[in-house]
Image (cartoon, helix red, strand yellow):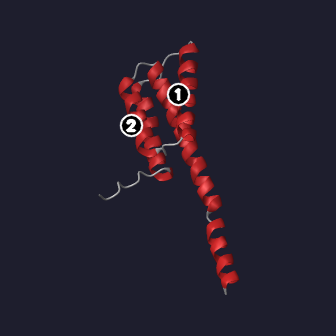
Amino acid sequence: MNALHAMLLSLIVVLPAPAFAADVEAGLLAVKTLGSVNGQALACAETRLAARAKQLMLAHAPKTQRFGTAYEEATQEAFLAQTRAAGTCPDATQLTDRLNRLALQLAESLPIAAPAAK
């Protein structure tokens, strides 16, 4: 009975792992995209939108080095790409639309955890 019990427990632990990994990767991709929008907003002096991107990051992303680094690198890359490009900045409406879509995506892939009861 103990061997059967141990085998069942190991299956319970192993089976959800691929779904969890996919969720983490989807969340990481959303955070990278959020960083890109943030970098573009910063380069285009859209400080209100950059502040909203940061707020979404802080609210949704796990407080880990992996997620923080992904966000910062995507921000820097997008900022440099925008400042180096000879083109014009997208208007605030376009950036707002992207942030709104990202907010929905983040809510699905990285939902905000309820605060612990005190």
The spot of residue 4 in percent (x, y) is 68, 82
The spot of residue 40 in percent (x, y) is 49, 24
Circle 2: element type: helix
Residue at point 47%, 19% (across, down): 43
Q: What kind of residue is marked 2?
A: Gln
Residue identifier under label 1: 75
Residue at point 41%, 51% (across, down): 112
Image height of 44 relative to 62, above or below: above
Q: What kind of residue is marked 1?
A: Thr
Residue identifier under label 2: 55
Say which quadrant the C terminus sits in.
bottom left
The spot of residue 24 in percent (x, y) is 58, 50
Q: How far apart are the two marked residues, 1 and 2, measured between alpha carbons?
A: 14 Å
Circle 1: element type: helix
Q: Nearer the viewer, residue 2 or 66?
A: 2
The spot of residue 8 in percent (x, y) is 65, 77
- Residue ranking furthest to the left: 118
